[in-house]
Amino acid sequence: MLDKKNPKNELVIAGIEVKATPRGSVGGSNKSGTTKVFDSRALTDAQIKDYAQQLTGGVPLKQTRTPGVYMAELSDGTTVRLRSVSSSDQLTKARWTIDIEKNPTLRGVTDQRVELKFR
């Protein structure tokens, strides 16, 4: 999904396909491909939370001190964060963001934090 040579712009969550906005569009996915903004109106908040939990491989997402922010630290050093707060929410209209940081597999593609935003 993040590989510029093979850009995948869809996710299937709970059997529902959601599409990413075009790269470089206003309020949409960024040109570098590290942020994908998905039109997720067909998904419930619970389905987005369940998807984030799947990305942790079973490590529980725990609420942080910040309301609306949940985090899991995986044994390989990856951090998965689900948050309902974002400094760019006025631009992207995202209701949830999943951040993935320090993932060994993604390091082959980017050393940046990866964001999946759901609006």
Image (cartoon, helix red, strand yellow):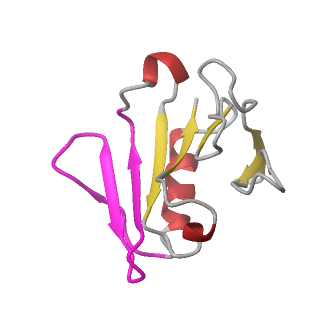
Residue at 20% over, 43% down: 66
Q: Is-magenta flag for residue 59? A: yes
Against 110, residue 91 (above or below) is above
Against 71, residue 87 (above or below) is above
Tell me how many marks there are: 0
Q: Which quadrant is the N terminus positioned in?
A: bottom right
Over which residues does the magenta segment extend? 58-85
User: Residue 72: which quarter of the image?
Assistant: bottom left
Q: Is-magenta flag for residue 83? A: yes
Which percent across, then down, holds residue 24? 68, 27
Residue at 64% over, 34% down: 29
Which percent across, then down, holds residue 117? 55, 38
Residue reaching furthest to the left: 65
Residue reaching furthest to the bottom: 75
The residue lying toward the viewer, choosing from 36 and 83, is 36
Residue at 54% over, 65% down: 55
Which percent across, then down, holds residue 56? 48, 69
Q: Which quadrant is the C terminus positioned in?
A: top right
User: Residue 76: which quarter of the image?
Assistant: bottom left
Residue at 83% over, 55% down: 5
Q: Is residue 40 left or right of residue 116?
A: right
Which percent across, then down, holds residue 11? 74, 50
Q: Is residue 93 left or right of residue 101?
A: right
